[in-house]
């Protein structure tokens, strides 16, 4: 059973769901820290392509990323379908100030059918008092999105009608970029014709965990008993 005690601590909880996206949920499960260097390369916290090391733990996989500037990062994939990482808080406070600390984010990747999925996610940020009020207002502004349909923008990018760089309102641009990257792989990705490299280590490693467990299931052997969220001590400020 999953247990995430940090999400029960005082602070901001921000649960969200995505619309249904037209591709298999494993396109999303494959999403790894390296994609940031390519898909979100215009982002404010760009640190280039990290060196990746992945290892199995009690809950699934922990990914260690080492950047060229010497900084490191960690994220988790809890079996079978949950991503768990830290990132910068999603919104600024009144006056443009930043929240001190980071947000933890959980993403539950939910299959709808073979060619569709959605994501239930929840973020937690340790804030209190006036900072919490200002942060909640910023989230509300994001939630009341009145801009163009983000999925329609992603489809237009895939059709080659324009580039994501051309979208003026950048507040939710990462969703458009992720849509193009994930849905653009096809409703069911063409894994046999991929050319995976060293930076895809965590992708390969997690697929191997899945294959090991699926093989055991098919052959009637016992599956690994994953233990909650395991040891999360590696999570830290990104
Ligand atoms: Fe992304």
Image (spheres, rainbow, N blue to C red):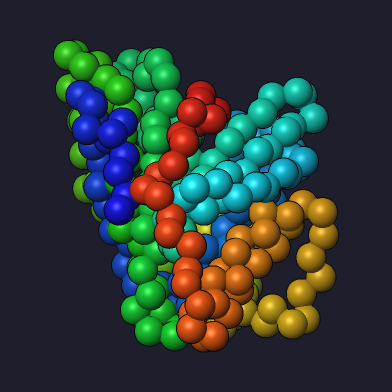
Position in image of residue 216 (x %, y %):
54, 77
Side of 195 where 56 appears, left or right: left
Q: Is residue 7 above or below residue 35?
A: above
Residue 127 position, x and y percent, is 27, 20
User: In the figure, 100 relative to 158: above or below?
Assistant: above
Compared across the picture, whether 65 is left or right of 193 comes to: left
User: Which is nearer the eye, 84 or 95?
Assistant: 84
Could one spot residue 159 in this view of the protein? no
Q: Nearer the viewer, residue 107 or 88?
A: 107
Residue at position x 40%, y 45% from top?
Answer: 229
Q: Is residue 40 left or right of residue 48?
A: left
Residue toward you, 76 or 123: 76
| Quadrant assignment, res 159 | bottom right
The residue depicted at 77 percent of the width and 24 percent of the height is: 69
Q: Position of residue 154 (x, y in %)?
A: 49, 66
Q: Residue furthest front?
A: 221
């Amino acid at each position: 059973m999953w247990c995430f005690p940090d999400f029960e601590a005082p602070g901001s909880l921000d649960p969200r769901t995505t619309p249904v996206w037209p591709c298999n949920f494993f396109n999303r499960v494959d999403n790894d820290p390296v994609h940031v260097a390519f898909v979100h390369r215009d982002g404010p916290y760009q640190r280039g392509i990290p060196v990746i090391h992945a290892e199995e733990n009690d809950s699934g996989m922990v990914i260690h990323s080492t950047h060229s500037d010497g900084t490191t990062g960690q994220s988790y994939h809890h079996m079978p379908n949950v991503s768990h990482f830290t990132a910068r808080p999603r919104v600024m406070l009144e006056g443009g100030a930043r929240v001190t600390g980071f947000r933890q984010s959980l993403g539950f990747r939910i299959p709808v059918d073979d060619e569709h999925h959605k994501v239930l996610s929840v973020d937690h940020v340790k804030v209190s008092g006036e900072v919490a009020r200002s942060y909640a207002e910023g989230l509300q502004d994001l939630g009341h999105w009145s801009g163009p349909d983000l999925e329609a923008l992603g489809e237009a990018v895939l059709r080659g009608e324009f580039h994501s760089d051309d979208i003026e309102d950048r507040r939710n641009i990462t969703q458009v970029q992720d849509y193009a990257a994930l849905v653009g792989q096809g409703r069911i990705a063409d894994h046999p014709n991929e050319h995976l490299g060293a930076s895809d280590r965590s992708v390969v490693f997690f697929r191997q965990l899945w294959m090991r467990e699926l093989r055991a299931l098919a052959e009637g052997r016992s599956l690994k008993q994953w233990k909650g969220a395991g040891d999360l001590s590696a999570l830290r400020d990104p």
